[in-house]
Image (cartoon, grey):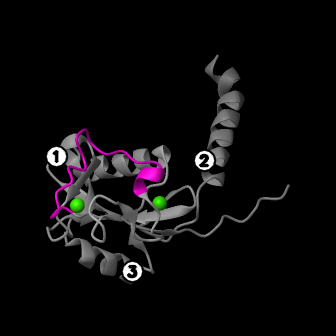
Amino acid sequence: MIMALLPIIIAVMTAAFIAQTGASALCDDGWTAYGSSCYFSDDKTQMHWAEGTNYCQAHGGAYITTIQSEGEFLFLQDMCRRLFKNDRNNFFYLGATDEEIEGIWRWYTDNSLVNEGYHNWSPGQPNARVNENCAVLWGPNDYTWHDHFCNENAYVICEKPGLKRPEVVG
Ligand SMILES: [Ca+2]
Ligand SMILES: [Ca+2]
């Protein structure tokens, strides 16, 4: 029975593999693809938000990750969960700030308004504190978003555009 099903199983797995890889960018070693971007993080290095922008820039011209869709959020949430397994007592900077105008959150990569696109603030967040001007993926709330201090040591995930996979002609 299993042997009879084997060609079907292989065909389904191959189709799933092609569907998955066809949607993802090509990334350098150590980077993980999602959509057209590549992402990098580690569980050793913590830094202030401004240091994070330099840290990512120094990694191939990347930036602190921005989130444009639920799918991208779920991918990053999963990445954070994997990095720390059962420990949620940590947080990761996001590339969004309301430093310029209190309460007006913008992605620093293109100045677009966070709340006009996909966003996933924790309940009651951002809580509009004038000294909390950087967005984070907040571990204790399963990496939904908080406003937080910009000068605390936090983890960062860097994002950069991936290389497009060559079209397979055939
Ligand atoms: Ca992004
Ligand atoms: Ca603020």
> What's the residue type where badge 3 is placed?
Gln
Circle 1 residue: 87
Query: Which tag, 3 or 1, sits closer to the chain's start?
Result: 3
Quarter the C terminus occupies: bottom right
- CA–CA distance in space, label 2 to label 3: 28 Å
Q: Residue furthest front?
A: 101
Q: Residue at x 43, y 63 (%)?
A: 39
The location of residue 54, given as percent across then percent down, is 32, 81
Under circle 2, the secondary element is helix
Circle 3 residue: 57
> What's the residue type where badge 1 is placed?
Asp
Q: Nearer the viewer, mark 2 or mark 3?
A: 3
The location of residue 18, given as percent across then percent down, is 67, 47
Sort mark 3 into few (<14), some (14-19) or many (20+) by Cα contacts within 10 Å: some
The location of residue 75, given as percent across then percent down, is 43, 48
- Which portion, as a residue range, is magenta? 114-132
Disc sitting over residue 20 in the figure: 2
Residue 159 shown in magenta: no
- CA–CA distance in space, label 3 to label 1: 28 Å
Q: Are marks 3 and 1 in contact (CB under 8 Å)?
A: no
Sort mark 1 into few (<14), some (14-19) or many (20+) by Cα contacts within 10 Å: few
